[in-house]
Image: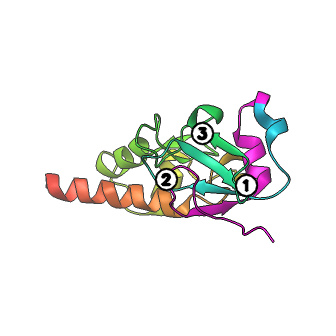
Amino acid sequence: MVEKNDSCPICKKAGDKVKNTTVEHMVCDELVENVKSEDYYLCMDEECDVVYYNSDLDSVFKKRDVKVPIWFKKDAEPKYVCYCNEVTEEQVISAVVKDNAENMKDIVRLTGAMKNGQCEIKNPSGKCCHSVVQSAIDKGLQFKNKKN
């Protein structure tokens, strides 16, 4: 019996499980036929070039193979916090600092983040962006508190 592996073939760090449906929507059109029917892992190492890999390690997609920048990878530009509505970390921080947003409700109203959610097919993690948006709010609040 072959042992399944959840570690990235390049950096050897554990990844987060992602449905193959998400991967099919994220990879460049010419690579969709290479997506296997099984689920994948998202490499969570910000330095690693790998984005998705499967448990048999025979299907790997790198940053150049996906349609969008991966928010936590070191050179992501733009750095989306909400892929469904293309809201960036910079926009959320600006809403906190310049428009006095204080919470998720304010950010949703000011930026449109988390409206019309299609996270399974638009977010590279296949999950809701709530925690990533909240992290951006927290960064903005820290920045704002340092300025005052």
Q: Secondary structure at mark 3?
A: strand
Give the mark, 1 or 2, whose residue is nearer the N terminus.
2
Give the mark, 3 or 1, whose residue is nearer the N terminus.
3
Q: Secondary structure at mark 1?
A: helix
Q: Nearer the viewer, residue 50 or 95?
A: 50
| Residue 99 seen from this side | yes
Mark count: 3
Residue 22 x, y percent position in the rendering: 74, 50
Please report the residue visible at 64 percent of the width from the left and 49 percent of the height from the top. Answer: 52
Q: Nearer the viewer, residue 126 or 138?
A: 126
Q: Which residue is mark 3?
A: 62
Between the C-alphas of marks 1 and 2, the distance is 25 Å
Q: Which residue is mark 1?
A: 120
Please report the residue visible at 42 percent of the width from the left and 63 percent of the height from the top. Answer: 103
Label 3 environment density (alpha carbons within 10 Å; few <14, some 14–19, many ≥20)? some
Please report the residue visible at 51 percent of the width from the left and 56 percent of the height from the top. Answer: 44
Q: Which residue is mark 2?
A: 11
* Residue type at tag 3: Lys
Q: Quadrant of residue 40?
A: bottom right
Give the mark, 3 or 2, whose residue is nearer the N terminus.
2
Q: Does 79 lie within the magenta span?
A: no
Q: Does 16 lie within the magenta span?
A: yes
For the magenta stretch, what is the residue range?
Answer: 1-30
* Residue type at tag 1: Glu
Quadrant in which the C terminus is drawn: bottom left
Q: Is residue 24 left or right of residue 131?
A: right
Pointer 3 and pointer 2: residues touching (CB < 8 Å)? no
Foreground tag (3 vs 1): 3
